[in-house]
Image: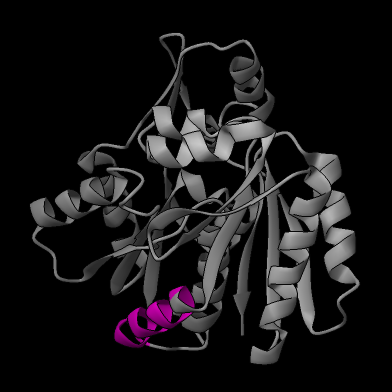
């Protein structure tokens, strides 16, 4: 059945270019500015941000303009009756505001802007589930309700080497960061429904693994558990985590989605490793 609803997302979702093309998704890119030089998210290698973080270079990010979203909406409306625009959590970026402003300028009630209230591979997961739902022939109103149901069933849990990167970018309070950095403790943060909290503190990377595996295990009573693993510079740890979660059994769908997008990596910082955790 041919779907009637088009989809626009921003580049922080980290969607594979082949997947984007196959599903006719429009991606609106953010920018990364390293020592004053602009790069388009998705067009620079992730290791460039990692190297910049290690070298303590100035790294900033820039949201898309409303005009960029308007162009994406117009492109989608050529082939679809209505459009859903799904963005990175508005509590983290002004991207959602730009998307809404673009809609307002166009004065088109066929465009529906949705705050994903998540980040990293959370947006990727929501996109994949939404495309499946729309391909079944559901209308836009059903899809908007479905998105809210999905958001209520998932959250991001991650760790970093140093919370100061999140503080410097205004994503976490200084008091929380001070507590998290005491005695080289590994902080564990949860991002749920647009709110970032320092949830727990452990003494080692091994204990981070145990915590994440246990959080996945807790959801097994609710149904099929979905685990999506992403990282900034921790590929070996990501593989180890995938192996440990895989041992939980066949009712767990776990996979590594890869490196976190450059824009998000710039804010998360070195040592970033985490999971999007949901149940179906």
Q: Residue furthest front?
A: 183
Residue 4 location (% of width, % of height): 38, 78
Q: What residue span does the magenta drawing correspond to?
A: 139-151
**Does the stretch in magenta take in 149?**
yes
Asked whether, in this view, residue 145 is left or right of residue 215, the answer is: left
Give residue 85's quadrant in the image: bottom left
**Does the stretch in magenta take in 228?**
no
**Which is more toward the observer, 268 or 110?**
268
Where 256 falls versus 3 (above or below)? above
The quarter of the rendered structure image containing the C terminus is bottom right
Q: Residue at x 66, y 52 (%)?
A: 274
Residue 2 seen: no
Residue 12 seen: yes
**Which is more toward the observer, 202 or 94?**
202
Residue 41 location (% of width, % of height): 50, 33
Asked whether, in this view, residue 76 is left or right of residue 244, the answer is: left
Where 137 falls versus 121 (above or below)? below
Q: Residue at x 51, y 68 (%)?
A: 126
Question: What's the coloring here?
Answer: one colour
How many labels were placed on the picture? 0
Residue 148 location (% of width, % of height): 38, 78
Where 24 falls versus 178 (above or below)? below
Q: Residue at x 86, y 41 (%)?
A: 236
Residue 18 location (% of width, % of height): 65, 53
Q: Main secondary structure of the magenta part?
A: helix
Give residue 67's quadrant in the image: top left
Q: Residue at x 50, y 83 (%)?
A: 133
């Amino acid at each position: 059945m041919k779907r009637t609803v088009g989809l626009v997302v921003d580049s922080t979702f980290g969607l594979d270019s082949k997947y984007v093309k196959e599903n006719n998704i429009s991606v609106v890119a953010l920018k990364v500015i390293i020592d004053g030089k602009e790069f388009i998210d998705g067009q620079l290698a992730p290791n460039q941000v990692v190297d910049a973080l290690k070298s303590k270079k100035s790294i900033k990010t820039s949201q898309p303009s409303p005009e960029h979203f308007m162009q994406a909406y117009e492109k989608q409306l050529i082939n679809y009756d209505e459009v859903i625009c799904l963005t990175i959590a508005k509590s983290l970026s002004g991207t959602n505001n730009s998307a809404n402003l673009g809609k307002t300028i166009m004065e088109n009630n066929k465009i529906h802007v949705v705050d994903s209230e998540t980040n990293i591979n959370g947006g990727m997961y929501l996109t994949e589930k939404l495309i499946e739902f729309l391909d079944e022939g559901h209308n836009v109103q059903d899809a908007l309700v479905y998105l809210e149901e999905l958001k209520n069933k998932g959250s991001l849990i991650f760790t970093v080497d140093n919370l100061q990167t999140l503080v410097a970018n205004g994503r976490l309070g200084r008091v929380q960061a001070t507590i998290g950095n005491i005695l080289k403790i590994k902080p564990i943060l949860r991002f749920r429904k647009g709110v970032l909290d320092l949830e727990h503190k452990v003494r080692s990377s091994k204990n981070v693994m145990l915590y994440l595996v246990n959080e996945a295990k807790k959801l097994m009573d609710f149904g099929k558990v979905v685990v999506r693993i992403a990282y900034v510079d921790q590929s070996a740890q990501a593989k180890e985590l995938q192996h440990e979660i895989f041992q939980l059994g066949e009712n767990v769908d776990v996979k590594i989605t890869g490196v976190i997008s450059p824009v998000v990596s710039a804010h998360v910082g070195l040592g970033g490793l985490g999971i999007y955790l949901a149940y179906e």
